Image (cartoon, helix red, strand yellow):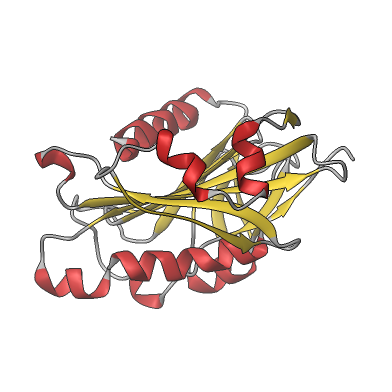
Amino acid sequence: MRYVISMIIMIMMIGCSGREMADRINGAMVYASGNRPPSAFRVANADVMSKYIFNMENYKIGMPEGRAYDFIGKNAYGDKNGWFGFTSYDRDVSFILDPYYQIDVSTNECPQKVTKYERAILDNNLTYFKKFFRPGLFDKIYIRHYGKESYRCLVTEYRWKGKDYKNTKFIDYDCYKFNPSKTEYECVTISLTYSKPLDPKLARIFTYEDLKKRARRMLDSLYIKSLW
């Protein structure tokens, strides 16, 4: 479902952006307007992914780790293989390796007030979150530190019920940057969607653990901007 919605938005953005022009940035084909991040892009190769940084309104982040074989042949829908994606409102960015991997990054518009929820993250109080997350839906809930400034990140690994999601897994990293007095925060969420290939050979290559490893570059490169 996330993938379908993302594709619809991207098609609308490409089709309705007549004033945008195709440009080549560090070898990646993009649709660019001025100095803003590209609204839609297709990556040229794995080397580009290791160098390109997305400078968004509230954060900076690198691309996931690419592999040479990501760009060979065609995907399950007959399209040229490789990573592509889009950005919106200078806040959200998505990276897609169709149809196996999708990574979505989003953030709040401005600093938010710390509530009991964020206080529980500061206190490493995982017991607090049991009242929010239904048993059985969430496989794992834990707190880790990622990013340029070692942000506290609430990590949730989960599945959705139903036959349409039996081969799909999700993991969210909600990474928080607090002000010195711990009364306000900025949050960047990195969401991973894994769709297991039906082909057994591909299923051994494109795995859930592989997706998490590839996303580690993004987590390590994350820098959250702030007003304080």
Q: Residue 81: x, y in percent?
A: 31, 60
Q: Considering only vertical position in the picture, is 48 above or below 56?
A: below
Residue 92 lies in quadrant? top right
Can residue 54 be seen? no
Q: Residue 59: x, y in percent?
A: 71, 47
State left or right for residue 225 relative to residue 190.
Answer: right
Q: Nearer the viewer, residue 220 or 135?
A: 135
- Image quadrant holding the C terminus, namely top right
Residue positioned 38% across, 38% down in the render: 133
- Image quadrant holding the N terminus, namely top left
Can residue 24 be seen? yes
Q: Residue 112: x, y in percent?
A: 72, 29
Residue positioned 19% across, 53% down in the render: 78
State left or right for residue 64 relative to residue 184.
Answer: left
Q: Residue 116: x, y in percent?
A: 63, 32
Q: Considering only vertical position in the picture, is 52 above or below 183?
A: below
Residue 194 lies in quadrant? bottom left
State left or right for residue 186 relative to residue 171.
Answer: right
Residue positioned 50% across, 49% down in the render: 126
Q: Considering only vertical position in the picture, is 168 above or below 7?
A: below
State left or right for residue 146 relative to residue 155.
Answer: right
Q: Nearer the viewer, residue 83 or 218?
A: 218
Q: Nearer the viewer, residue 92 or 213?
A: 213
